[in-house]
Amino acid sequence: MLWADRVLADVGTPLIWATGGHLLIGNLFIGIFEGWLLSRLFGFKPVSSIIWMIIANYVSFIAGAMAIQKFSSLVDQYYSNVPPIFRLRSTLLTFAAMSYIASIVIEWPFCYLIAGKPLRRWRRSFLASVCAQSASYAILIVLYGFVTTTTMATVPDFQQDLSFVKDPTAWVYYIDPNDGAVWRIHLNGRGREMFAETNLPDLNARLYAERSATTNSGLRLAAIAGMRDQNPRIVKNSFASVAAPQPGEAGNPPITWSSFDSWGGIESWGGPGGQLEHDLRGKDQREWTCCTGQWASEGILVSHNHKQEYRLAYATPFSSEGEWTCRNCITLSGDQAVFQVNDQILILDLPSRKLGFLTYGRGPVVALD
């Protein structure tokens, strides 16, 4: 069984625990099952079949671990003109199909060894490999179905244009992943321009707005250069009067971790009032709220009148746990939200589930003026 997994060495979700167990001892039991099955269907020697299929599964895993990055790069190149959010479904199906085919090919030589010297040995051994992988994949699909999350690919109503945006003139400030500079763009995807030349290449760099402690000149734009950065940089003084996220007075930068959770405390996780620090609406306009979780499998949770409506998340054995983590959720008037996932800045209409791609970027700040 080929298992080309890229889950980070961390703890916290059922998928991580399931994958870790699969890698450590799962291949042993899969090999035993496949060897027993081949001995029953094809008359192979039981002990020899089990031993060789155990070895085959571990070899298959090592080969998959070595090839996954290369294959992922090829997939990205093939779909390079399509934002990742719009190709989740096709990418998942591609990875699953190629994993299945590669498993058959890699474990075929082991089935050939088990087959001995009967007539039509090549054909019989290939059929045995197909049967073994089909049976084990059928079981694993069911088992991993309990811990795999694909609602990011199945629940939203994907929009190729941003005509559904209700406040097109608002600015989104963000860090460009390619040059580390601060850019800005309107919510409708127009007017993209460089705002400040900075050097913020770190994956966990982010922007935030803060009030001046000494003047009334509005908010200033600041940046945190990385996960453990304690010395924020001032990008621009007096860039807006209304913006989010905005943690407080000058010199009070947010605590930054890789999840970029909300700064509103417990309330940001669906409690009374929704995300106070990330919500640009009046308190009487918060029937629809959203918040992000620490893990990719938690994604972004959308609630209506404090009751969960749906969750958008993506965590599969073919993606790392941090790859599709939802970050920096900012709720706007009209019950729409801007958030970041996988270096993409997206906009979601909470009631209709319309989801659009705005730009590639990190650590967004939304300014209304």
Image (cartoon, rainbow, N blue to C red):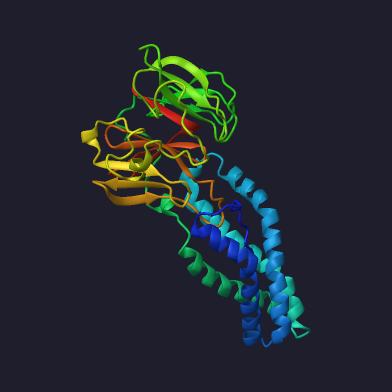
In the picture, the quarter occupied by the N terminus is bottom right
* Quadrant in the rendering for residue 2: bottom right
Asked if residue 137 shows in the view, the reply is: yes
In the picture, the quarter occupied by the C terminus is top left
* Quadrant in the rendering for residue 188: top left
- List x then y, in percent, for residue 336: 32, 36
Q: Nearer the viewer, residue 266 or 136?
A: 266
Asked if residue 1 shows in the view, the reply is: no
Q: Nearer the viewer, residue 319 or 23?
A: 23
- List x then y, in percent, for residue 350: 31, 42
The answer to whether residue 323 is above or below residue 108 is above
Residue drawn at (42%, 24%) of the image: 209
- In screen coordinates, is 304 left or right of 91? left
- List x then y, in percent, for residue 312: 40, 49
The answer to whether residue 149 is above or below residue 330 is below
- In screen coordinates, is 107 left or right of 10? right
Please count the marks in the image. 0
- List x then y, in percent, for residue 49: 70, 81
Q: Residue farthest to the right?
A: 117
Residue drawn at (69%, 86%) of the image: 46
The answer to whether residue 144 is above or below residue 7 is below
